[in-house]
Amino acid sequence: MLLLEVKNLDIDYKTQEGTLKAISDVSFTLRQGESVGFVGESGCGKTTLAKSIMKLLPKNGSISKGEIIFKGEDLVKKSKEEIRRIRHLKIAMVSQSAMNSLNPVYTVGDQIIEGILAHTNMSKKEAAKRAEEVFSIIGLEGKRLKSYPHQMSGGMKQRAIIAMALSLNPDLIIADEPTTALDVVVQDRILREILSIQKQMNSSMIFITHDISVVSEICDTIIVMYGGKIMEKASTKIFFKKPLHPYSLGLKNAFPSILDIGEELISIPGTPPNLMKNLSGCRFVERCPFRTTLCQSEMPVLREAGEDHLVACHYIDKHEAFTEAAELRETWEAVRSRIIQEKEEGA
Amino acid sequence: MLGFIMKRIFTMVIMILLVSTMIFFLFRTMPGDPTAFIVDPSIPKEARDQLLERYGLNDSLWKQYTIFLKDLVRLDFGNSFFYGRPVTVIIKDLIPATLILMFTAMLFAYIIGILGGAWMAWKRGTKLESFGITISLIFRSAPSFWVGLMMILIFAVRLKWFPGQGMRTSGYTGETFREIFLTLDFLKHLILPSIVAGLYFVATPLLIMRNSMLEVLSEDYIEMAHAKGLKESKILYRHAARNALLPVITAGALFIGSAMGGLVLIEYVFSWPGLGREIQRAVVRHDYPLAQGAFIIIASLVMFMNLVADVLYVILDPRISYK
Amino acid sequence: MSKTVVSTSIKSFFTSKKNSQGFFPVFINNLKRDKLALIGVILLIFFIGVGIFADFIAPYEPRERHYNEEGKIRRLEAPSKDHWFGTTDVGRDIFSQVVLGTKTALTVGILAALLVTLVGATVGIIAGYSGGVVDAVLMRIVDFFYAIPFIPFVIILSAVLKPSIWNIILAVSLLSWRTVARLVRSQVLSIAKRPFIKAAKVAGASHSRIMVKYILPNVIPLILLEMAFMVNFAIMAEASIAFLGFGDPQKPSWGQILHINFVTGNSRSAWWWTATPGLAIVLLLLSIFFITRALEEVVDPRLRRR
């Protein structure tokens, strides 16, 4: 059964300079127990997408089109109070900055209990017991509940945030870069814990990261986003065997597997597009090594490229040549000089 | 915690000592005849010499200072020239009037300031917010004594709603604290001066609360509180306002000193029989022992209230250790 | 490297560049958007004009007594064509007094603010930059001055000093530099950690040179803001002192007008005599507050609207 179905979602930010189209025409589904990873550079709309599901967009942001169907009901149409009841109880968030997501003047335990009490009829005592349970699941001692955030290490705080998200057995956990602020060793351990708990509880998960290698460890499905649109969607296994979109190929270069150690990384030259502008062609056109005039004029639609594999590129059939070329440094260097040249011409 | 308070009390005592010392030397080392500041120059020579002798003003400065310190510890500020009674006794009667006015006004200002500031931050960017800011700036720009004069003119003289001066209707006599302060007559007299003082005080907590609230509202833990599905009111008051209060308290501690100054003017305008009005009168009457004593007491009160604010801060913010 | 950083920081202070917004450009830009700040600037220019040309604008001598056609003193007359703000109990022209009071208010405000910021900034920069014992000692002195309640102290001071505006300026400055010193110090503490200061040290710049050439330009916006607040504070302080009867008897000031109004008992009846000098204070202080709000956005970029 589908837990979540996002259909043709558009999200705009109103700014002084004009409207910024942060998300355009994004659709995807999520089954019970499935975990999907959203990857892409910062500014590609991942976080906006995550926040829109919880209706936590900043004041100047709004869903201008589309549906977010959660357990058969459209969240877009729900009232503030209805959304409030769903948050945390059904959809819980593990936020980007664990360091600052805990209120410094209350103990961690108080903050977990508060969340439980907001949605259940439990007594304070029962809630405290539940908090202790989730703490032990995540590997923290019960007495830590009495600590203030400033008395805990970064890793502990992150665990506490995860424990908080788990406290009501939510159907869906949204984890937005949950480990970026931590050092690599702690990061790895916490990722493993998240994974095992998610499988154990059979919750669904949306995992947002810029680090493509993390997704390979954790998620069933991967969605690559760029410029507010989905570029490629596939099961993780298939994706890592055979990424098709030129942007995915570039991303994979930037996060090499352990075998590539010693080689210098190849990054994608240039920056993500300005979403204030009306973009007619492919979002990736400025930085794509394989672009044609068609790419400049027409936005490719997301279409099937194999079993469980969707790609938004005009040239799926050429992917073998692309894959080969993408591994070469010269391919991307050419893009770099092209960008510099275009800038000079533009100026 | 106890150690922290003890340490704070210790520094406070040192400060009171320093401030008293400064006042002592200010009175005695000014150009001209230093004794003229301590003894009324208009009295006859023999009487003057007698007084000088009695006050030990013929002794060396150092000896005078040690006597002054000894007296200070015993809270003995000498006799008032004007009243002929011990300064300590006079001041003791004035303190409650000042404190009651101060606390009523502070309470009024902080309740309105904190709630209003939080509300203004919540309404950020609307017309209501600019209106609120403008109003509070107007009251900040208006001298408290002038607002007092205008209020008396309008509400006491023209509309006759409240009495415009003093602490009680003339002819009323009360002896005990209860008879003096716990009466309807007293409350009526308290209303105008405390509103004026409150309006003068309110801008500080209001604007600081608004700014600090705006800062807090953009914190990640506020978003987290939303993500937890807490009710808006709970987020606003339990999470945002609670944290935004901390700077208001710090600023409040520094503000108490200037609040006391404003109070002097308000007491003067309303003929409120408190410390502030008395210090003004004492200086006009050349009653220096009283002026000196009142000043030291006012300074000590301010420092004591600072200490209370500091302790409050430590209680409210668990991140501060008690060292 | 250090030089370029500093020179750009100074340059960006006066000029606008695309990525680094300068001080005055941002301020001017704010004026266009912030109507209140614009009103503030216009009002302030008006007051400064009145202050400078006070002697020409004031129609009469402030102590001159006026008589009507019947030869009687124009005692407590409400505003009229001859006397715009009415007359006092001894027939003096209130409008002339208020106009001349503007001069006193601005003189005290500006001179005291200059003195306060000069002392405060110097102490703040030295304390913040030196650190250690120097900082500790200076900050204890600051603490000491915080412990002295302002108005009561000024009352005491006026008992031992002759009442004059110079003594009032002195008294205001004596007790207000601490605020500036404290704020500047904390700003300096954060600036002193920046790389270009370290680079300057390594390059062998002397301490005084670092403080003047490298740190000072970076705290000037804050100092200007504090100076504006201090102008207000000093004007208010002068008015308060004069109202209590300790003002300079030679110089007509707003506080003094109100003092005479109050002690003669006329504050309960002659509204024109009470209202006009007070309104002058409110409008002048308000104009500066409106301006400081725009200044604050420059000093603290977090307050800038996106």
Image (tube, coloured by chain):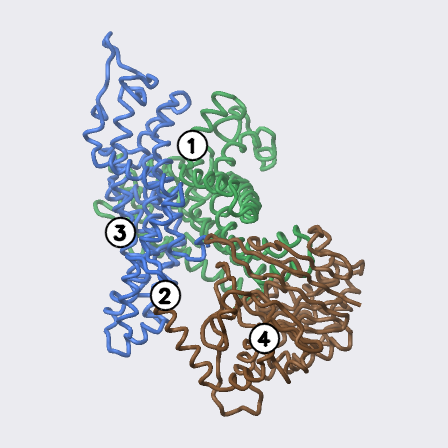
Chain colours: A brown, B green, C blue
Image height of A98 relative to A184, above or below: above
Secondary structure beneath dot 2 equals helix
Q: Are marks 3 and 2 on the same chain?
A: no
Distance between the Cα atoms at labels 2 and 4? 46 Å
Label for residue A346? 2
Q: Disc 4 marks which amino acid?
A: Gly
CA neighbours of label 3 inside 10 A, class few (<14), some (14 to 19), many (20+)? many
Image quarter in which the N terminus of chain A is found: bottom right
Q: Are marks 1 and 4 on the same chain?
A: no
Query: Mark 1 or mark 2, which is nearer to you?
Result: 2
Distance between the Cα atoms at labels 1 and 2? 71 Å
Chain on which label 3 sits = C
Classify residue B77 as left or right of residue B131. left
Camera-side residue of C84 and A35: A35
Image quarter in which the C terminus of chain A is found: bottom left
Q: Disc 2 marks which amino acid?
A: Gly
Camera-side residue of C70 and B138: B138
Q: Disc 3 marks which amino acid?
A: Leu
- Asked if the residues shown at circle 3 and circle 2 are in contact, with their CB atoms under 8 angstroms apart, the answer is no
For mark 4, what is the residue?
A: A154
Classify residue C206 as left or right of residue B142. left
- Asked if the residues shown at circle 1 and circle 4 are in contact, with their CB atoms under 8 angstroms apart, the answer is no
Secondary structure beneath dot 3 equals helix
Label for residue C115? 3
Camera-side residue of C202 and C27: C27
Secondary structure beneath dot 4 equals helix
Camera-side residue of C195 and B185: C195
For mark 1, what is the residue?
A: B269
Chain on which label 4 sits = A
